[in-house]
Every structure is written in structure tokens, then in C-alpha cells.
Image: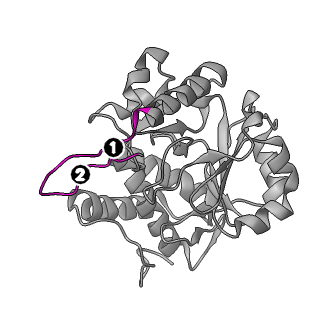
Amino acid sequence: MDHADGVECSEPPRRLPSQAFIDNLRKHVNLYQDRLGLCCVPLLYREKRPDLAKGQMREWVTERQDLHHIEAFIGGVAIVCGEPSVGLFVLDVDVDPEVFREKHPVLFSEHPIVRTNRGYHIWARSSTPVHTDKRDGVEILGESKEGVLPHLVTAPPSRHPSGHLYRFINEGKLSGIKEVGDGEKWLQDLLGAPVVSREGGADYPVLIPQGSRNVELTHLIGYLAKEIRLGGLGQKHLLALALDENERRCVPPLTEREVETIVRSIWGREIAGGRGFPTERAERPLGSP
């Protein structure tokens, strides 16, 4: 049983893992770190939040911790995607997962597969950086943008907040995580061209034409602002990312001054003002069309 028993209190008792759960968790963490070279982060029990003190996150996600940190793992474990885990990237399949499985049976025979609360996580490694995006309804969790903390993916035997137990459906594949060579090319062949996930389930277009540039770039910068703040960085880093996205996506790009105006507006209103982030499309663009 995973809950603490026999505690009388006026409030519901805190959910605590059993010793058997903790022992199994630490066995998995040893496997991930020692045999597979993965960077692990402890999670709170039945939550997706790291079980770390304020200020510790960057240390844990940027380098693989020694096994003497094993006592930190009590409630769950997340794997750090990207370079800290030697090129690990994860396909997060939540939409029509069984249809996806029928469409791509080879993936399920060659790669470690985790059964999640709503679908599957498919683990793979790339010899070249694989960037986080979304393709054909599948979230790709890989390298984060410079200055932003890496992505974490919950791993077995953690429990989802719903109580679902993350588990491998083919644990034998954990003898090694298959490397696919050039990950971006592999994904292109498998799933097609990338887009970037937007809060609320929509997508950021790869190319933004004139007439949509301010609206789309404003939403993308709003998303990046949230990631920048979580990473403990500031407006200067946000501006650098925004200018890069403007050059890569907007056709033609907005001027540097126009991008600076959007960044100042979002940072001042949404970050310094503490009023959250935009989730709806802007009704009117800022600056030029």
C-alpha cells in the first residue's frame, strides 16, 4: 500500500510511498545512472514537481549526479532530456496512442517504451542535438533552447498524480537505448516537419508570413518568457531567443526594434507584473503587420 496508515489528524494524511516502492525506485535510479548514463532528478511522490530545494535545480539538470545522491530519491524520478543524458530524446504520444502504435510497430520493438497515464513515452538517443518540438501530434522532448532548463520526463516506477504507475512495456530493451544517428533526420522521415508546441494544444508555425508575424511571434515570445523565468534568467536572454526565432520563422523578419518592443511589453506586463502569460491569440498585432 502506498499511503501511510494509522495516522489520526484533522486533515487528510499526506500521501507517502511504501518502503517497497522506495527500494524499487532506487533500483531503477541506479540502472538509469550507472548502466544507461542518464541524468536523474528526484520527484515528489505522485507529482511531477522535482523534490529539490530552491536553487538546486540547475545543478541537478546540468550534470549527472553521483550515486551517493540515491537517498534523495523517495517519491519518484524524472530523466533529463538532451545532452545531460547523452543525447536522450523522448517521443510523448498522448493523442490516439494505439493508432500510433499500429502505424509504427518497429518503434515498439526496438526502443524502451513507457506506458504513461494517457499514452506512451518512446526513448531514443541521437548523435546530434534533437530540439523540442511537435510533429504529427507527437511531442518531441529533447534539447532546450540555450539558457532554458532542460526538459524532464517522468520515468518508472514513479506514480502519476492520478495514481497510475509508470511502467515499461518492454523492460528488456533497457539493456541499452537505441541510437538513431542523426535524430532530426530520423524524426523527419518518421513524423514529418516540426512545429513548436503552444500552450493550450495549438502549434507555433514553422514559417510565419507577413500579416501574422506580430500575432504569432507575440505568443511564441510569451511562451519563451515563461521558460526563461523558470530557468532563473532575464529579459536579455529572452530578447536573444526572440531575435533568433524572428530570423528563423518570420517571412520577412520583423525589425530588431519591433522585436524589442514585443519583448519589453511581455516582460514588463507578464513577468514583472506577475499576471501570468497570454493563452489566447492577440486580437490586434503590435507594430507592423
Residue carrying label 1: 16
- Crowd rating for badge 1 (residues with CA inside 10 Å; few <14, some 14–19, many 20+): some
Measured Cα–Cα span from mark 2 to mark 1: 9 Å
Residue at screen point 65% across, 62% down: 195
- Tag 1: residue type? Leu
The relative height of residue 207 versus residue 12 in the rendered view (above or below) is: below
Q: Nearer the viewer, residue 67 or 272?
A: 67
Q: Are marks 2 and 1 in contact (CB under 8 Å)?
A: yes
The answer to whether residue 66 of the structure is visible from this angle is: no
Q: Secondary structure at mark 2?
A: loop
The answer to whether residue 18 is magenta is yes
- Tag 2: residue type? Pro
Residue carrying label 2: 13
Magenta residues, start to end: 2-19
Q: Position of residue 120 (x, y in %)?
A: 66, 55
Image position of 191 (left or right of 97): right
Q: Quadrant of residue 58?
A: top left
Residue at screen point 16% across, 50% down: 8
